[in-house]
């Protein structure tokens, strides 16, 4: 995902980039939000799947 974000920043330097996760992608999105904090404008979690994740 860092490669995709870097490419988008090169092509669209003024764009605010958000990463979204839906259903099973929500768990991966949570992981990215912990490890990529500050690299993108934000993270969106939609239609969450039940998981045992705790902050």
Image (cartoon, rainbow, N blue to C red):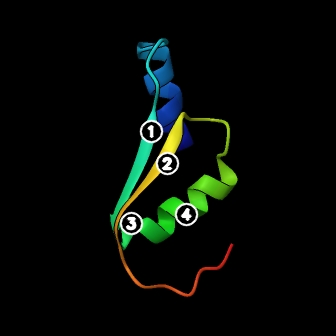
**Mark 2 or mark 3, earlier in chain:** 3
The answer to whether mark 1 and mark 4 are in CB contact below 8 A is no
Residue at 39% across, 51% down: 20
Q: Which mark is residue 44?
A: none
Q: Secondary structure at mark 1?
A: strand
Q: CA distance from mark 1 to mark 2?
A: 5 Å
Pointer 4 residue: 30
**Pair 2/3: label in front:** 2
Count neighbours of disc 4 (C-alpha within 10 A) and say few if under 14, some if 14 to 19, many if 20 or more. Answer: some
The answer to whether mark 4 and mark 2 are in CB contact below 8 A is yes
- Identify the image quadrant of the C terminus: bottom right
Relative to 46, is 14 on the left or the right? right
The answer to whether mark 1 and mark 2 are in CB contact below 8 A is yes
Residue at 44% across, 45% down: 19
Q: CA distance from mark 3 to mark 1?
A: 14 Å
The answer to whether mark 3 and mark 1 are in CB contact below 8 A is no
**Mark 1 or mark 2, earlier in chain:** 1
**Mark 4 or mark 2, earlier in chain:** 4
Residue 21 sits above or below residue 43 on the image: below
Residue at 63% across, 35% down: 39
Relative to 45, is 41 on the left or the right? right
Residue 42 in the image, given as x and y percentages of width and height: 52, 41
Residue 22 in the image, given as x and y percentages of width and height: 32, 63
Q: Secondary structure at mark 2?
A: strand
Count neighbours of disc 2 (C-alpha within 10 A) and say few if under 14, some if 14 to 19, many if 20 or more. Answer: some
- Between 1 and 35, the one lying in front of the other is 35
Q: CA distance from mark 2 to mark 3?
A: 12 Å
Q: Secondary structure at mark 3?
A: helix
Q: CA distance from mark 4 to mark 2?
A: 8 Å
Pointer 3 residue: 25
Residue at 42% across, 14% down: 12
Q: Which mark is residue 43?
A: 2
């Amino acid at each position: 995902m860092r490669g995709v974000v870097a490419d988008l920043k090169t092509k669209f330097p003024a764009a605010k980039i958000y990463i979204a996760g839906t259903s099973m992608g929500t768990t991966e999105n949570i992981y990215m939000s912990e490890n990529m904090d500050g690299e993108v404008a934000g993270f969106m979690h939609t239609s969450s799947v039940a998981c045992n994740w705790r902050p």
